[in-house]
Amino acid sequence: MFEFELLATDGPARAGVWHLPHGDVTTPCFMPVGTQGTVKALSPRDLEASGAQIVLGNTYHLHLRPGEDVIAKLGGLNRFMAWPKPLLTDSGGFQVFSLEGMRKVSEEGVEFRSHIDGSTHFLSPEKAIEIEWTLGPDVAMAFDHVIPGGASRTDAQAALERTLRWLARCREKHELLKAEGSKLKPAPFSLQPSAFSQCLVPIIQGGTHLDLRRSSLRGTLDTGDWRAVAVGGLSVGEPKVVMQAVLADLETVLPAGLPRYLMGVGFPVDIVASIGLGMDLADCVAPTRMGRHGTAFTDGGQLNIGTARWKERDEPLDAGCDCEACTTFSRGYLRHLFVAGEMLGLRLVSLHNVRYLIRLAERARAAIIAGTFDAWSREWLRRYSSREPS
Amino acid sequence: MFEFELLATDGPARAGVWHLPHGDVTTPCFMPVGTQGTVKALSPRDLEASGAQIVLGNTYHLHLRPGEDVIAKLGGLNRFMAWPKPLLTDSGGFQVFSLEGMRKVSEEGVEFRSHIDGSTHFLSPEKAIEIEWTLGPDVAMAFDHVIPGGASRTDAQAALERTLRWLARCREKHELLKAEGSKLKPAPFSLQPSAFSQCLVPIIQGGTHLDLRRSSLRGTLDTGDWRAVAVGGLSVGEPKVVMQAVLADLETVLPAGLPRYLMGVGFPVDIVASIGLGMDLADCVAPTRMGRHGTAFTDGGQLNIGTARWKERDEPLDAGCDCEACTTFSRGYLRHLFVAGEMLGLRLVSLHNVRYLIRLAERARAAIIAGTFDAWSREWLRRYSSREPS
């Protein structure tokens, strides 16, 4: 369990499969975000139809509402949201560190006020891991110290060192919970309780400083027999070329045998670029957030479905797409739904965008296996970037 | 085409089948409302899964946005909204007469201001029929003079007489369009253009006055070889017993061979009562409107899914229901979706409510065919009314 098989490489780009308790995840892979126990506007059936293999849940949001104990009583997060395939939860670190002015950080952890009702809560490495264990996903992310995009080298170094200390505490707590066995954990959706297992994944920090990134990776690999490695703290405001430089350097030192999860990235261009730089898994709220605003990803670039130019247009959002929105409805109809304020519009463009990113990863995978990734990705980028803005 | 077969009766209750160009409609039948070219929160696939046989479109809304010409260019209303089964459009009469203070009524028609942008528009019998022809549904409703619930006898009489005069104009226009053939009409979704046909259906008015209702019916039947009859102007604020008295009296004089459409009704209790009084078809926005507010119809009565009592409850909304919401999710999860403001909650409870009413009509039909409608409906009503409010 939790093994990663590397099936093909094409330059730094990789195609593989990650074996998780609720199923296999073929990589490269885009993971939709189900913040509050639902990928916004989509049902589990929509997600399965979109080809989703793994969904992310947010520990911060689920802890505040409805609370991990409620979810455990209702059978764990898989059963709660009726998602039968793999789940990954973040640790809440990214969210609580974003609560500028509403949080107090110490070595012990982070005291913060809820964005919902202002009530006071506390997250520590131990607490985050306990919540994630109770939620019951296949993959639990470690609790890390996240810094703003433009943080100084000193701050970045302090944060990565704290992240390493916290990682040791996460690991100890996770081992303890595993040793205690099934007492605390819910019965996963499609498994016998005895088959439940969970993988803890560390997060590499270090901001945009190449040497700090390498130091964070070394410190992490030295402390455990990890089954995957995540790269955090990117796509937080730094220029794209800076992010790509960090990934390009990290790629040369990341172990080949572990899946690499680039957290919170991203838009189509970022997904293709990160695959080209050796990343295996990515997540982002962009497809559903953009979808709710009527912005659709297409092979010809982004388009805004609400504009008047689509009023009488009979073609689908994206002629090459096999999603329900593209195989069923015209741009004219989708535009009408947005102009008329109909919920179905938000859902259909969200569905399309999620399918677009998942299919993008599938296409990248096919190109990697065929040994044509470089040519494919250049041609894709040329078309995606050539479109006049709409 | 447009023939109605009466297959069984059980007292006044009837089971039949209405043959329409886009398919058969078995009756009694509940028809979901797709106001703006979409049944709110649901996709065509959701509707098909809910057992919907026919959907209503609103001429008033579709004329204002996106306009019938746009819909015609995009293949007609069936194709526009990707609904392959029968469609019925109202004439806009009910909507424009509801625009108190924003409309001017004359014998010619109704001048009104759009609720969207205040722009001035005009609907007449001829204009409404032309719009409905252009939209291309199987069934087009006549343009009638609608009066408020508590209207005087004098007003009710004047309105029903005008409705009869307008009906003659609707019929003349409809005959003209049929004679002109395919020039104006769109290609329907699943038919060859040459197979397109449309049925014009008259509306009985007369308020709550039994003799005026009979007079409206006589005047209507005298003027045409209609294929169905609708009863309008009920469920507009009058007590339920008054509506039922009107239906009970009308039932004795309605021709058995025509399907009877009770417009704008209603809630589960009204649906069952109207079936018991010989009505065959009903529509209402209640299931989706209530669904968006978290109120669910169940065999134990209405329940509000947002209340705290459901927080940790694992059972479905309605144990007897076969909809996606009930076969997939717990009340605890649905409650969470509403508390967290997630769109999926609105969709799932809307879907359940639509399926509930469609299944209610299916259950009534089975009881009518079995000759047990009276006992079934009493038992259903006893359970539906026995629930403590939640």
Image (cartoon, coloured by chain):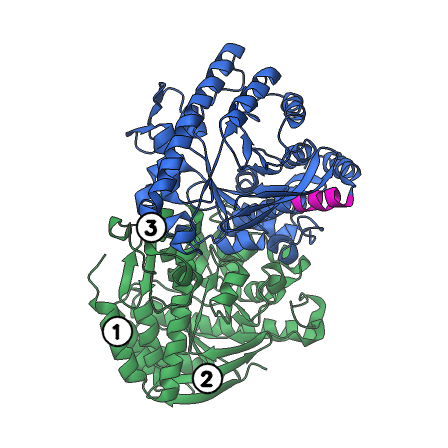
Chain colours: A green, B blue
Q: Residue A94: percent from the left, percent from the top?
A: 43, 62
Q: Quadrant of the C terminus of chain A?
A: bottom left
Q: Is residue B152 left or right of residue B184?
A: right
- Residue ID for mark 1: A381
Q: Residue B367: percent from the left, percent from the top?
A: 75, 44
Q: Quadrant of residue B230?
A: top right
- Residue ID for mark 2: A16
What mark, if any, has residue A335 been given in the picture? 3
Residues shaded magenta: B361-370
- Mark 3 vs mark 1: in front: 3
Name the chain letter of the residue that bears numbered label 3.
Answer: A
**Residue at disc 1, secondary structure:** helix
Amino acid type, callout 1: Leu
Q: Residue A47: percent from the left, percent from the top?
A: 50, 64
Name the chain letter of the residue that bears numbered label 2.
Answer: A
- Of residue B249 and residue A328, the one placed in the foreground of this image is B249
